[in-house]
Amino acid sequence: MAQADPLLFWRMNGISKHYGGVRALENVGLTVERGRIHAVLGENGAGKSTLIKIMSGVVQPDSGSTELEGRPVRFASPGEAMLAGVVAIFQELSLVPDLTIAENICAPEPPRRFGLIDRRAQRRRAEELLARVHCEDLHPDEIVRNLPLSRRQMIEIARALGRSPKLLILDEATSALTAVDVERIYGILDRLRKDGLAIVFISHRLREITTFADDCSVFRNGRRVDTFAKGSKTDAEIVKLMIGRDYNDVFPAKSARAGAAAPLLEVANLNWGDRLAGIGLVVRKGEIVGLGGLDGQGQRELLLALFGVLRGVDASIKVRGKRTRINSPHQAKRRSVGMALIPEDRKTEGLVLPLSVRDNISLAAVDRFARGGLIRTRAEIEAVKGAFQTLSIQARGADVPVGTLSGGNQQKVVIAKWLLTDADLILLNDPTRGIDVGTKQEIYKLLRNLAEAGKGALFYSTDYAELIGCCDRVVILFEGRIVRELAGDELTEQKILSAAFNLPDEEKAACAAVH
Amino acid sequence: MRSGSLKGVRLWFARNNGALFALVLFIAMFALYVAKNGVGVRTGLITAVANKGVLLALVAMAQTLPILTSGLDLSVGMIFVLTNCIASTILSGPPWLVAAGVAAVLLSGVICGAINGALVVYGRLQPIIATLATGAVYNGLALLVRPVPGGSIEPTFAAVLTTQIFDVVPTTLVILLAVVLAIWLPFQLSTTGRGCYAIGSSESAAYMTGIAVRRSRLAAYMFAGLLAAIGGLLLTAMTLSGDASAVSGGIYTLSSIAAVVIGGTSLMGGVGGAVGSIFGAFVLREVSDLLFVFDIQPLVQPFIQGLILLGAVSLGALRVLRARSRLEFLGVGR
């Protein structure tokens, strides 16, 4: 039956992919037809990106089969996929920044004469393709690095068209675009659909995609939970499909008195380039404030800006009511500020993997054990022992290299390290990504205990259930701005999700989802 | 074309401002040298300046390629010395034998480069470590080939390479121009060369674009070996001998990096070109001439040259001033 369908272009069956111990995709099947636009929807971490990485040969599946026009295929690299007509445009742009527009558009197979690249033909071809995406104003000799994100995205699309694709995959290809450009893209895609191209489209602009696509597939936790034709489900129903499992018992009870205490951190009008705009927020003593929204809306940058990692941050920041400037993590750590940042990637920014667990735990607070420049080992050992117990780190002792610990325990070491600095304000950058539920639960409990002890936390998580269960308040970021603040009863998945998609009428969506 | 042709010219200048800066700097320094020297521009003077500059220019061109891929080749100076030593033993006899010898010298340079490239690409070693080690090996080989300085070179062959064409243009400059036209420009205009720029600018983007990352990087080191070998050949013709000098190899390596930076190539990779490195090499050569005509004491000269080299390689750090995240200082990000 599959071979008989002349429209069927792509089929995958039983695809699974694990990264270390983390499941990204589990037994996923998907079919894509010619002349149709297939939208893929899902929360952060639902497996959408892994799916298209497999389709376009960037990663290889652990198991399962893929078929193109009825023939089994397996792409070892993006280059192979391209030759077969499968062209992907990725969320993280794949343009080479120091090459010109024309060079990027014509890579990897530029027009050649006598074996050498024909620059004139290359420029002409670039001009043609730029015209197809209505970007005639761009000069083909312009260096890509100097262009704003939205223009680069258009170049990326022009380049994809130049590879004469049969299956075009767009991963968040419109997220950086202006409304005018998005309209253009939709016009272009509509024409391609009529020409018989198969198109797979991932977007966070839920509203637009559900009217624009022909088919929609919803992913959740690495599985495809449903596929349906356009118009057969409401926005609210789709949002409901995307929402994950029940987490309620995992979280400790919230304290009642948050909201009245003295402010610990006050941020007003924080700007950073074109990535953060007019951010203002307050974290009080005893409060856990969540940072929500879709992945990549500026949450990470906000934490890095507060911690002094970014340059050119323009903001008014007060710590305990006093205006402060923080220009490096070293300054952020000072007692007068008392910040800690649990970073996103524990392997590169959190831990020194070859060093022992003890050395890692004491690394941030090592000056506390030093007298006259020398580290007093006894004090250090005592402090590390205390941290071991508070966090119940599972290890064969404090002397083993931290790299030998499991992911969850490594993350505990990172947290222990920053707790030892006795910071008052703890910034957390998605600290539970890729760790087991048991450890997550311990981290939630620990956070709540710290809050009870009068500390404050700013907690970015890509897991909405976590934001709801853990945080007293959640601010939602969209395109570098705070679009909504939710607290108390407002903290529901529907509200967070619709705010994250920046849907204007989240009330309606929430109501519709109830029945 | 559209109205953009004026813009095209402006963009060309923006892309090549590093090389143009080096060219202007060289012209200014050369003018100063000629004025101070007071003997006027004579063919002999030009030939002397050219011969000194061309050797470093070739080694600097060699260095440019690995740097464009955001690598580094610490063995270019040693390949230069090794090929010099090999050339000093085989370039004698009838013309056909000399021709075969030239081919053998160039081939040995390519092999040295291929070993470097293979270690970096397939051995996954850091370029700086891999080439530091192979550089020591090549120097050791040079000593085996030529334990004491000396050699016998076909005198007519050497004379042809070091005289002037029409009694005006130094042959070495013509050879340099030929190398640019016959090796560098085709390389830059090949998909492999384009791949080198792409890797240096963003390796992940290059890979995702379907560019042959390994082939390009391997080619960069092989061409570096070839260019260094051409330098070694010319050195042999000029000195009529070979000398397995680790010191001169080391100085050429360091100077080549400085010349590359002066010529506008980014040490981060992805930006620049070998033509700029040629100008950078001539600028560096002119420094020693100026020190000479301004009567700087010979004992102080190495110190001043060292400071200038340090200053030159520091140019590469200027780019960091534009970084927006302090993490980029550490060479992450970018």
Image: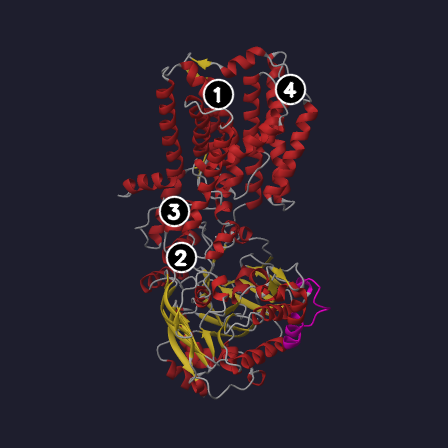
Residue type marked 4:
Pro
A250 and A505: which one is in front?
Answer: A250
For label 4, the residue is B149
Residue B105, placed above or below residue B94: below
**Colouring used for the render:** secondary structure
Residue farthest along the right direction in this orientation: A396
For label 2, the residue is A153
Quarter holding the N terminus of chain B? top left
Nearer the camera: disc 1 or disc 2: 1
Secondary structure category for the residue under label 3: loop
Nearer the camera: disc 3 or disc 4: 4
Q: For this view, does B299 lie left or right of residue B132?
A: left
**Which chain is disc 4 placed on?**
B
**Which chain is disc 1 placed on?**
B
Instruction: Measure the alpha-carbon separation of dots 1 and 2.
Output: 49 Å
Badge 4: few (under 14), some or many (20 or more) residues near its Cα, within 10 Å? few
Secondary structure category for the residue under label 2: helix
Secondary structure category for the residue under label 4: loop
For label 1, the residue is B51
Instruction: Measure the alpha-carbon separation of dots 2 and 3.
Output: 14 Å
Residue type marked 3:
Ile
Instruction: Measure the alpha-carbon separation of dots 4 and 1.
Output: 20 Å
Instruction: Measure the alpha-carbon separation of dots 1 and 3.
Output: 36 Å
Q: Earlier in the sequence, mark 4 or mark 1?
A: 1
B266 and A366: which one is in front?
Answer: A366
Badge 2: few (under 14), some or many (20 or more) residues near its Cα, within 10 Å? many
For label 3, the residue is A143
Badge 3: few (under 14), some or many (20 or more) residues near its Cα, within 10 Å? many
Secondary structure category for the residue under label 1: helix
Q: Residue at x 63, y 67 (%)?
A: A410
